[in-house]
Image (cartoon, coloured by chain):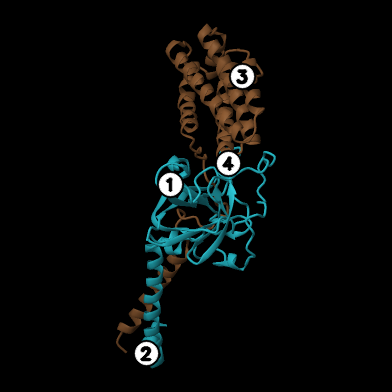
Chain colours: A brown, B cyan
């Protein structure tokens, strides 16, 4: 069966109410988290909170890309913005400054992530379409990682350290030709000279 | 030619020299093949310690790396004082605070002679957590970076970190770890856990098509309580 045919067949299949509701709510959660992350990057009073905000942007952007592909495949329309309640909650936080902002922001993120976890668990238990359930399963560990980070006040681990672009210190390509040339020439010289010395005059 | 070598006195002397030279070349070649750590990059790394001739940048000089977001208003870095200089193997390496890039990776100062201190994480004066400093092993534009010789640092080697409050924090190298870039342990960046220093650079196979090095080298150091 062609992949295109499968996708067409999937798209034509109408999603259950549970699956549709999950797609819409999870998408708005992602949008709300991205907006929250941007607020932290702009307003945080410590580098810790700023980095926490950045990881929310990075991770929820990635999760939302996966989600939008599945929604597109099923012809589900997604809202362009977070819910009015989510927007109002963030506005209350961004009205604050300094350490008060950091604290209010953290509390809001903890509550939002707990709600997102509950949403995902409900989809896993009650959803029907395999690809929608898979979204919830993919997002769960990421959201949990964020929640643990926020509750413990720890810094996020970056997704990598790219500390070198010159290529001069590469090791797996071996040691180059020089040692082989040295050893080879050494063998030849040794053989010729050794043979010469062993001959009687 | 062999008849000349065996026939004349001069020829025999040359043959003896040839044996000696052959043994020396063979030994040199075999030694380099046997211990690739010594020869790895040794022929190709641009002049050693060239960064000592470069003017030391003041830590307050803005980094030339440009994050995608506009610069944030001045923020408190941390409760404890920020690191300014890392000293190891006779080198003084200026440090700048860095944070997370939009792609989620750790920002690094663009100049290869400046190290980046992971500002969201622990500072040397904090009661817990890992102080993370990352630096270039090399760059395409400038050649060898400050951490070109990090892999050669022996266990037991001292490292010290000076902070803005005038303190000097001393550490002793305890471990060197090579990990695939995707497998960098999250607890290396944690503000919790035992006080320690982690110095990170790149290593391993290099992807010329833009992927860069595939591995990270992490040098761990414990506080010197002596």
- Could you say which is closer to the camera, residue A52 or residue B217? A52
Local packing at callout 1 (Cα closer than 10 Å; few below 14, some 14-19, many 20+) is some
As drawn, is B97 to the left or to the right of B193?
A: right
Q: Element type at marker 4? A: helix
The label number, if any, that marks residue B7 in the structure image: 2
Q: CA distance from mark 4 to mark 3?
A: 25 Å
How far apart, in angstroms, are the residues tagged by discs 2 and 1?
Answer: 60 Å
Nearer to us in this view, B185 or A154:
A154
Q: Secondary structure at mark 2?
A: helix
Write down the chain letter for disc 4.
A
Q: Name the residue that disc number 4 marks.
A: A47
* Helix, strand or loop for disc 1: strand
- Residue B60, horizontal then vertical, whole percent: 65, 54
> Which residue corresponds to mark 1?
B179
Q: Nearer the viewer, residue A55 or A16?
A: A55
Relative image position of residue A100 (x, y in whole percent): 60, 32
Q: Report the side of A178 relative to B69 (left or right).
A: left
Between the C-alphas of marks 1 and 3, the distance is: 40 Å
What residue do we see at 45% from left, 52% from top? B197
């Amino acid at each position: 069966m062609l992949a295109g045919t499968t996708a067409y067949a999937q798209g034509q299949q109408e999603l259950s109410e549970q699956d549709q509701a999950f797609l819409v709510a999870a998408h708005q959660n992602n949008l709300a988290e991205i907006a929250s992350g941007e607020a932290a990057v702009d307003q945080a009073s410590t580098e810790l909170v700023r980095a926490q905000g950045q990881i929310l942007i990075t991770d929820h952007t990635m999760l939302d890309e996966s989600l939008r592909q599945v929604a597109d495949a099923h012809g589900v329309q997604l809202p362009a913005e977070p819910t009015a309640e989510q927007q109002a909650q963030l506005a209350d936080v961004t009205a604050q400054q300094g350490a008060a902002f950091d604290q209010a922001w953290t509390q809001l993120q903890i509550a939002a992530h707990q709600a997102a976890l509950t949403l995902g668990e409900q989809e896993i238990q009650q959803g029907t379409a395999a690809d929608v359930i898979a979204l919830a399963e993919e997002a769960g560990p990421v959201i949990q990682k964020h929640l643990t980070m926020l509750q413990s006040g720890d810094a996020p681990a970056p997704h990598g350290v790219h500390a070198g672009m010159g290529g001069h210190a590469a090791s797996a390509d071996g040691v180059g030709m020089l040692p082989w040339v040295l050893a080879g020439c050494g063998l030849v010289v040794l053989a010729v000279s050794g043979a010469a010395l062993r001959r009687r005059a | 030619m062999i008849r000349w070598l065996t026939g004349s006195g001069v020829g025999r002397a040359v043959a003896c020299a040839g044996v000696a030279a052959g043994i020396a070349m063979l030994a040199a070649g075999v030694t380099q093949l046997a211990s690739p750590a010594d020869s790895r990059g040794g022929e190709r790394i641009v002049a050693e310690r060239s960064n000592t001739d470069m003017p030391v940048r003041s830590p307050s000089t803005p980094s030339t790396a440009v994050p995608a977001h506009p610069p944030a208003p001045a923020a408190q870095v941390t409760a404890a004082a920020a690191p300014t200089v890392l000293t190891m193997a006779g080198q003084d390496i200026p440090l700048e605070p860095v944070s997370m890039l939009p792609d989620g990776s750790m920002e690094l100062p663009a100049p290869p002679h400046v190290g980046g201190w992971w500002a969201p994480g622990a500072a040397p004066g904090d009661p817990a957590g890992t102080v993370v400093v990352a630096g270039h092993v090399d760059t395409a534009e400038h050649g060898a970076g400050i951490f070109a010789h990090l892999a050669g640092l022996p266990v037991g080697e001292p490292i010290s970190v000076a902070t803005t409050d005038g303190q000097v924090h001393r550490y002793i190298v305890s471990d060197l770890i090579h990990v695939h870039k995707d497998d960098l342990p999250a607890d290396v960046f944690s503000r919790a856990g035992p006080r320690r220093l982690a110095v990170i650079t790149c290593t391993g196979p290099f992807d010329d098509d833009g992927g860069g090095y595939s591995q990270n080298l992490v040098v761990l150091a414990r506080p010197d309580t002596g």
